Image (tube, grey):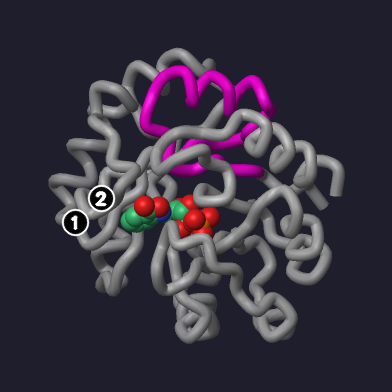
Amino acid sequence: MSRTRVKICGTTNLPDALLSAEAGADALGFIFAPISKRLVRAEVAREASLAVGPAVARIGVFLNQGLDEVLRLAEGGRMSAVQLHGPLAPEFVLAAAQFYPVLRVVRPADLQTEAQRWAGHPAVTLMLDAPEPGGGVPLDWAALQADFPAGAWLAAGLGPENVAEAMRLLRPAGVDAVSKLEASAGQKNPQAVKAFVDAVKGS
Ligand SMILES: O=C(O)c1ccccc1NCC(=O)[C@H](O)[C@H](O)COP(=O)(O)O
């Protein structure tokens, strides 16, 4: 079984991209959803994407945005994958997956349905997150143990202190965090980023 991948989300500037990459992150998230307090411009994301080297994935994060906008911003920011939040039609997810690997974000209530829907679609990977993304509130991992699908990623309220326990209970293929890794909204706390990556890789 391969090790759990670690994604640092909400990257808004070049120094934070570099510090996350140097800490050992496998993936950086760039939020293009206009409602986010961590919104990044495509030009900034592009500069960061080109600076972190070929081994670090760059994941464009979208919430209820049209396909043209998703593709334009993902291309402009030099993303390597897209993360799709919101109540989207399966056809929309499939259309995006023609262009980029997709992290399809689902809520606990939809997990079983979505797991069945996307089984056998290699371009679509599930990510379980709280109903309010970027809110820093953990899910009830014990309650999810029976249904957590192999290969799925986990987000919501993860940080250096609790990620090992979440991994022990759910064995996610990847973990994602933002709130607990910030000094302020959109600005990373370097010690927290390093501690989070080390906790994931040491588990
Ligand atoms: O974080 C945001 O501001 C955000 C806004 C709109 C859509 C998605 C957003 N974040 C997506 C993420 O991948 C977060 O890392 C994930 O929800 C976990 O956040 P947190 O619970 O704060 O660690």
Give the image location of residue 179, x and y in percent.
Answer: 51, 51
Q: Amino acid at mark 2?
A: Ala
CA distance separating discs 1 and 2: 8 Å
Q: Is mark 2 within 8 Å of ligand 1?
A: yes
Q: Quadrant of ligand 1?
A: bottom left
- Residue under the point 33% across and 27% down: 45
Residue 116 colored magenta? no
From the viewer's perspective, is 7 left or right of 200?
left
Q: Residues within 10 Å of mark 1 (few under 14, many from 20)?
A: some
Magenta stretch: includes residue 25: yes
Instruction: Locate residue 178, reporting x and y percent.
Output: 51, 48
**Magenta highlight range:** 6-28
State the residue position of label 2: 33
Q: Nearer the viewer, residue 20 or 188?
A: 188
Amino acid type, residue under disc 1 in the picture? Gln
Provide the residue designation for mark 1: 65
Q: Is residue 182 visible?
A: yes
